[in-house]
Image (cartoon, rainbow, N blue to C red):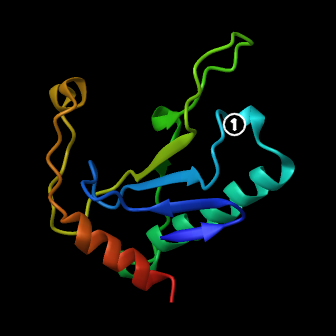
Amino acid sequence: MVRAGGWQAWVPPAATWPYEMLVAPIDHVDDLPSLSDDGRDGLAATLTDALGRLDAPRFDARPHAYTMWERTYQRPFDGIDRPAVRLHAHVTPLWRSAGVQRFVAAAELGAEVYFNPVDPADAAASLRAAGR
């Protein structure tokens, strides 16, 4: 787990993707526009640490693309009073592990039934080790 500036990032126990991380504020926040300057700085620091672990040398130090936009959950910020939602995001590298042929099928995405070839406990252990 990574913690910085009121934010945390961790590998969920049943990750959908290899090396997926959840990122969320430690205290309840409804949406990104509600963040204070310190909250935005904390998010930046947490993402810097978390993405650095994902780019660690065990992956040949190659920079990777990430997806976070499609999996950021927050209250719609449209001025309408809505029930509280806890802001959080899923960060997923857009690459395959060495030797793993992994292409996501449309049916897999549409049905939200995923096959993850990497044990989430192994992914979490390697990400923890990358921060040392």
Q: Secondary structure at mark 1?
A: helix
Where residue 95 sits: x, y (%)?
33, 56
Which amino acid type is marked by label 1? Leu
Q: How many marks?
A: 1
Furthest residue in direction right, as rendered:
37
In this view, the residue in front, 73 or 18, is 73
Question: Residue shown at 63%/44% (left/top)?
Answer: 28
Furthest residue in direction top, as rendered:
80
Above or below — where is 56 with respect to 132?
Answer: above
Where residue 24 sits: x, y (%)?
56, 51
In this view, the residue in front, 94 or 31, is 31
49 left or right of 101 in image: right
Question: Residue shown at 16%/26% (left/top)?
Answer: 107
Instruction: State which quadrant residue 52 falls in.
Output: bottom right
Above or below — where is 22 with respect to 76?
Answer: below
In this view, the residue in front, 77 or 26, is 26
Where residue 128 sits: x, y (%)?
42, 79
Question: Residue shown at 66%/33% (left/top)?
Answer: 31
103 left or right of 6 in image: left
In the rendered image, which residue does mark 1 sit on? 32
Q: Residues within 10 Å of mark 1 (few under 14, many from 20)?
A: some
28 left or right of 104 in image: right
92 left or right of 76 in image: left
Where residue 78 sits: x, y (%)?
70, 13
